[in-house]
Amino acid sequence: MSSTDGTPQELSEDLIFDVLKNRRRRYTLHYLKQQGRPVELSELAEQVAAWENDTTVEGLSANERKSVYTSLYQTHLPKLSDAGIVEYNQSRGVVELSANAAQLEGYLRPQDEFPWIRYYLGLAIVSAVLVLADFLGIPPFTAIPDEIWGVIIVAAFALSALVHYLRRRQLGTGERPPSAR
């Protein structure tokens, strides 16, 4: 699914939903994103098995490891590779995210519980009230020059956007994938 020059290709929504409908593939993608490097299949299989069995890697049985390893090797990694989401070298047993994987961000990222839409709407309403009060000459709003009001409002939105951005970047970086909690 990558072009010959290595640039990402647009993944269809149907393909994305088909790939992500399986929890084991979601766990795989979460772990690869978390690691940010090529990962050996055995390491990946152990971590996915640990999440699925709600235990540690050390607490896994041989059957639990083997079951996940086999399904990743035979089914899930080839499907992710065919979709162009991972680069999977089956002979070396190494897998990593491809450039196309970035298109899955909005589908995999856990949702922020903070009501950002309401927050920004409230901030816009407060800003509009401040500007209107200054425009109508209502004291004490007229004591502050218009330019200062502009700077304060822009700074409030900029600071809010920065906090929102930093929170979104932090989501999904935890040890366990969202659906394993």
Image (cartoon, rainbow, N blue to C red):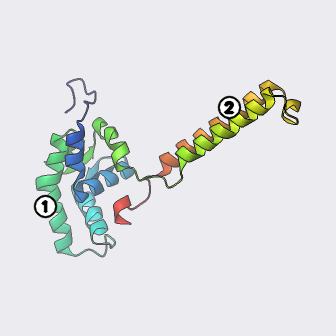
Indicate the position of residue 51 as horizontal and vertical percent values: 31, 66
Q: Are marks 2 and 1 in contact (CB under 8 Å)?
A: no
Decide which of 124, 156 is in the foreground and name it: 124
Question: In which image quadrant can residue 178 be found?
Answer: bottom left
Q: Residues within 10 Å of mark 1 (few under 14, many from 20)?
A: some
Which residue is disc 2 drawn over? 154
- The kind of secondary structure element at disc 2 is helix
Where residue 177 appears, as percent x and y from the top left, is 36, 59
Give the quarter of the figure containing the N terminus: top left
In the picture provided, is 114 more to the left or to the right than 55? right
62, 78: nearer the viewer = 78
Dot 1 corresponds to which residue?
70
Q: Is residue 40 left or right of residue 145?
A: left
Callout 2 crowding tier (Cα within 10 Å): few <14, some 14–19, many ≥20: few
Coordinates of residue 94 in the picture (x, y in percent): 22, 49
Q: Residue at x 68, y 31 (%)?
A: 154
Considering only order in the chain, which callout, 1 or 2, is on the residue closer to the N terminus? 1
Residue at image coords 20%, 68%: 65
**Which amino acid is tagged 1?**
Thr
Q: Position of residue 133 (x, y in %)?
A: 78, 33
Answer with left or right where residue 156 lies relative to residue 91. Answer: right
Q: CA distance from mark 2 to mark 1?
A: 55 Å
**Mark 2 residue type:** Val
Question: Residue placed farthest to the left in the image?
Answer: 74
In the rendered view, would you say 26 is above or below 165?
Answer: below
Answer whether residue 159 is visible to the viewer in this image.
no
Q: Which mark is residue 136?
A: none
Of helix, strand and loop, which one carries label 1?
A: helix
Image quadrant of residue 84?
Answer: top left
